[in-house]
Image (tube, grey):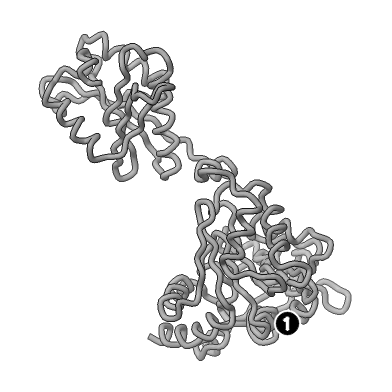
């Protein structure tokens, strides 16, 4: 292919380098309808950028969109891999070469801008660096870019069963659709999959935290000026299980919460939602001073040996591990005052109460230690992520000793 393009690839030593590079690196190839290769693009990855190291298209296929298709594939893969800047080096405009003038026009048409011409990068030839910023996909576009094929409800059902969920299971579920990829039907598909697996005999619980209904001096995402704190304490609406929004909980929980049979616990900042025959029994009562400890929904889930299901998230997002934290010697020495707006005797009040200064920073390490020591978790690939399943009782019992030992040190 390089021999067929002497106007662009006329230096034998350079061609040998290209051939050697392609032999040892992944490339994008364009093929005709008979499967013959008609074009190739070899990318080179740098720290925060990706480079078109080589692109070549057979002469008879020029002006047929082959080069554009190769560059589009390269750009999409780079964006999915987190690249923020694309680059290509080509012959600079100070050299009067008509072929490379067309090459520069090709890249400019694709959005690559000339950055700088260097005269000491290539022997006897000016090198022009052209760059293009990557448009970072967000939301649904990012999920599509990360997903090889749509994730269907049937695929979620199969993965949940492989992770250990069964008919009649009591489960606490944490989720992030974006980390799995593009799920056909979104949160609804996942909720329906959970119900299909557990049946009408099962009960599903999810955290539905409302971090804005808390002491404003400790807000971090984002923090608010100190001058606002007193206004927030005086004017924040009282917690209402039906109206109070959740904070950063995701599409699955939002969908689950709006089902008419779903109930929500009365804790203003750290509530849970549940659906199933044990829903009310698991969520009530939920005392202010024990968001995740004794007498909380987590404690009752532990008594039922509930299954933890992590959909696209890891143990760092597992609220259940706060129950282990509450049962450590460490917890008794780390109690702090909290505040929230709630109804008391028929009127809205700002209520101050004490609870543990919960800290999930080491939960990822705890989960890894649990898996290594017990083998007690199942990991099932799903889309761009995975589902993790384990016994709540087993990991909480393990976590108590692990947290006491590691936090003491």
At which x and y percent is residue 77? Answer: 42, 38
Quarter of the image where one finds residue 387: bottom right
In which quadrant is the C terminus drawn? Answer: bottom left
Quarter of the image where one finds residue 375: bottom left
Left or right of 55, for residue 245: right
Answer yes or no: is residue 230 visible.
Answer: no
- In this orientation, which residue lies closer to the viewer: 153 or 401? 153
- In this orientation, which residue lies closer to the viewer: 375 or 309? 375
Left or right of 267, for residue 372: left
Answer yes or no: is residue 204 visible.
Answer: yes
In which quadrant is the N terminus drawn? Answer: top left
Q: Which residue is drawn at 25% across and 22% down?
A: 90
At which x and y percent is residue 371? Answer: 45, 75
Please name the residue that numbered disc 1 is placed on: 287
Give the farthest residue toward the front: 34
- In this orientation, which residue lies closer to the viewer: 345 or 288? 288
Task: Please tell me whether mark 1 sits on a helix, a strand or a loop.
Answer: loop
Within 10 Å of disc 1 (Cα), the crowding (few <14, some 14-19, many 20+) is some
Q: Residue at x 58, y 83 (%)?
A: 393
At which x and y percent is residue 382? Answer: 54, 55
Left or right of 252, for residue 133: left
Left or right of 55, for residue 145: right
């Amino acid at each position: 292919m390089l021999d067929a393009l002497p106007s662009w690839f006329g230096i034998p030593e350079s061609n040998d380098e290209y051939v050697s590079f392609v032999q040892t690196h992944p490339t994008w190839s364009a093929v005709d309808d008979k499967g013959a290769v008609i074009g190739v693009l070899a990318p080179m990855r740098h720290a925060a950028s990706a480079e078109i190291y080589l692109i070549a298209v057979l002469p008879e296929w020029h002006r047929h969109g082959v080069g554009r298709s190769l560059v589009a594939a390269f750009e999409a893969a780079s964006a999915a891999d987190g690249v923020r800047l694309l680059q290509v080096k080509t012959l600079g405009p100070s050299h009067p070469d008509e072929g490379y003038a067309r090459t520069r026009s090709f890249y400019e048409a694709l959005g690559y801008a000339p950055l700088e011409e260097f005269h000491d990068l290539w022997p006897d030839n000016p090198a022009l660096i052209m760059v293009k910023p990557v448009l970072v996909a967000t939301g649904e576009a990012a999920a599509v870019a990360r997903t090889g094929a749509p994730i269907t409800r049937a695929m979620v059902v199969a993965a949940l069963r492989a992770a250990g969920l069964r008919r009649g299971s009591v489960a606490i579920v944490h989720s992030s659709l974006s980390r799995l990829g593009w799920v056909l039907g979104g949160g609804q598909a996942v909720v329906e999959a959970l119900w299909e697996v557990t049946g009408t005999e099962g009960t599903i619980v999810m955290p539905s935290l409302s971090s804005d209904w808390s002491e404003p001096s400790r807000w971090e995402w984002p923090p608010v000026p100190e001058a606002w704190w007193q206004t927030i304490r005086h004017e924040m609406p009282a917690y209402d299980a039906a109206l109070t929004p959740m904070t950063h909980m995701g599409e699955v929980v939002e969908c689950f919460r709006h089902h008419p049979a779903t109930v929500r616990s009365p804790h203003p900042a750290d509530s849970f939602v549940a659906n199933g025959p044990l829903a009310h029994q698991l969520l009530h009562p939920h005392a202010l001073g024990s968001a995740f400890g004794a007498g909380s929904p987590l404690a009752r889930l532990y008594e039922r040996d509930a299954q933890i299901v992590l959909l696209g998230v890891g143990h760092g997002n597992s609220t259940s591990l706060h129950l282990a934290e509450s049962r450590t010697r460490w917890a008794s020495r780390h109690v702090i005052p909290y505040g929230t707006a709630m109804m008391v005797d028929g009127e809205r009040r700002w209520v101050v109460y004490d609870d543990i200064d919960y800290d999930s920073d080491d939960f990822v390490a705890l989960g890894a230690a649990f898996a290594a020591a017990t083998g007690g978790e199942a990991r099932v690939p799903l889309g761009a992520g995975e589902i993790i399943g384990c016994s709540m009782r087993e990991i909480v019992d393990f976590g108590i000793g692990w947290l006491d030992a590691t936090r003491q040190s």
